[in-house]
Image (cartoon, grey):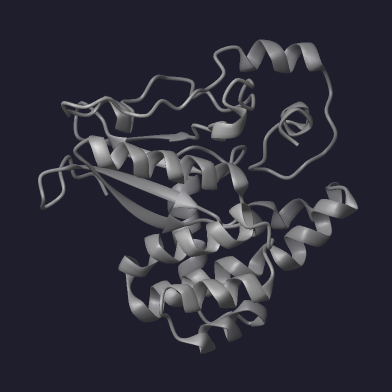
Amino acid sequence: MSETATPSGKTPVDFWFDPLCPWAWMTSRWVLEVEKVRDIEVSWHIMSLAVLNEDRLDELPEEYRDMLATKAWQPVRVVTAAWQKHGADVLGPLYTALGTRIHNNGEGPTVEAVAGALADVGLPAELIEYAEQEDFEFDAELRASHKEGIEKVGQDVGTPVIAVPGPDGEQIAFFGPVVTPPRRARRRPACGTAPSRSPPSPASTRSSGPAPRARTSATCRARAQQEGPRESRPRGGPPSSARRREG
């Protein structure tokens, strides 16, 4: 994934997501808006907050532990199975259907929401059987996709991960940006999302039209130092103070 242009001549943007994550969901909607006005082409890839946190479940509060041990696996298993059985082209539409149900409609990451999303995009209903398949048939593929994304940015962040071509053709990857939903556009976005270097963003690629803006915090490190010690929380989520502001 180090190409500087797709076959269509557009700039490739690789996007890793877990359908459970509301922050990745908002960023994915932003990047699709950017795709409408910039010469970019988004490719979707799976990562898993359950995989990211499975080695530290005992350190987390019970509410996180229960969610990551059960509900976090179900949507991502079904998405992985759909990808393996029906190709990568189903990832974008299925993610949109899942996110609409889980986040926009408030159904949550339930088996019923996942089954509904499969129906929404015309995928076979039997794919829902993978949701609770403990000895998951495509576990290796899921973990390989997750590893490819997370190794680009490090284990201490999460989803979304975005990768774009750098000046030398090699990919530059970063966590985020985490964007605020339109109804809260005046609120400060979550801390902990600004990359340590400034990569070329999808919104900076060539076009004649304006691109939607994604806001990130330029002072996240200073704010983190001021806040002091935090409660143990899963990798991949916003700081606790951000959850209080956004929740």
Quadrant housing residue 185: top right
Q: Is residue 12 visible?
A: yes
Q: Residue furthest bottom?
A: 126
Q: Residue furthest right?
A: 62
Q: Residue furthest front?
A: 183
Above or below, 226 against 160 in this view is above
Q: Residue at x 71, y 32 (%)?
A: 246
Q: Residue at x 60, y 12 (%)?
A: 219
Q: Residue at x 40, y 72 (%)?
A: 83
Asked whether 148 or 101 is in front, the reply is 101
Q: Is residue 140 visible?
A: no
Q: Position of residue 97 (x, y in %)?
A: 49, 64
Q: Is residue 21 left or right of residue 173?
A: right
Q: Is residue 141 left or right of residue 63?
A: left
Q: Position of residue 85 (x, y in %)?
A: 38, 81
Q: Residue at x 50, y 66 (%)?
A: 142
Q: Position of residue 62 (x, y in %)?
A: 89, 54
Above or below, 230 against 247 in this view is above
Q: Is residue 53 left or right of residue 25?
A: right
Q: Position of residue 95 (x, y in %)?
A: 47, 61
Image quarter of the C terminus: top right
Quadrant housing residue 227: top right
Count of all numbered marks drawn on residues in the image: 0
